[in-house]
Image (cartoon, helix red, strand yellow):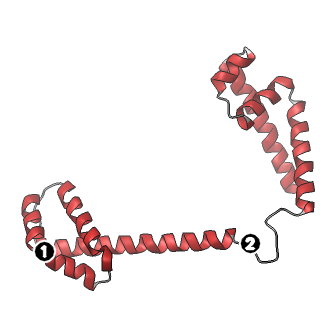
Amino acid sequence: MSSTGLEAVFLSNRDRLLGFLRAHGAGEAAEDLLQELWIKLSAAPSGPVAQPLSYLYRAANNLMLDRYRSQQQAIRRDRDWTEAATTIPGTSDEPSSERRLIAREQLGIAQAALDQLGERPAAIFRRHRLDGVGQRDIAAEFGVSISTVEADLRRAYRAMIDLKERLDEV
């Protein structure tokens, strides 16, 4: 049966398909699912379908299952996000004094590691990573080639990676 034949079966059984979707839990989304099924049928490559009505019921059921899974995933994601982002009553979202002190200390260590690379690599790294300036613009600003900017960034990234590994060991 061609896609136009499948579309004809769809159109002649539209009310039955809608009832099927509602009876199987689609609720108010039944019309949307039926519309989605119509769009998929219209876009699908044509070809013979041995049992077109069964095919349509299965396709409608699959769409309903996909939507259910998507909704469940969204609910889990929202719940997980809420649990992760929710402040415990009586506590502050602010980092503790100890964490602030550690972060300040690590920032100083990172700045020193960058400064050890030399003035230009440190400045290029800061312009790119902190200020968000593109490599081509940095090259023009410093009067160097893009490959020099890339080499300085590689050195700075390597220094930061090595530093992170040392800090993680502690």
Q: Are marks 1 and 2 in contact (CB under 8 Å)?
A: no
Return the residue at label 2. 87
Label 1: state its secondary structure.
Answer: helix
Give the residue displayed 87% in from the left and 26% down from the top: 118
Q: Where residue 83 sits in the image (x, y, percent)?
A: 66, 74
Q: Where residue 105 sits in the image (x, y, percent)?
A: 92, 49
Q: How many marks?
A: 2
Give the residue displayed 18% in from the left and 57% down from the top: 42
Placement of 101 over or under 130, stated as above or below: below
- How crowded is the residue under tag 1: few (<14 C-alpha within 10 Å), some, or many (20+)? some
Kind of residue indicated by mark 1: Leu
Placement of 15 over or under 2, stated as above or below: below
Kind of residue indicated by mark 2: Thr
Could you tell which of marks 1 and 2 lies nearer the N-terminus? 1
Q: Where residue 153 sits in the image (x, y, percent)?
A: 73, 31
Toward which corner of the image does residue 131 lie, by quadrant? Answer: top right
Judge by depth and name the residue closer to the eye, 33 or 149.
33
Q: Does residue 2 appear in this view?
A: no
Judge by depth and name the residue closer to the eye, 18 or 105.
18
Give the residue displayed 13% in from the left and 74% down from the top: 53
Return the residue at label 1. 53
Left or right for 27, reference 157: left
Q: Does residue 108 appear in this view?
A: yes
- Quick one: quadrant of the C terminus? bottom right
Q: Residue furthest bottom?
A: 23
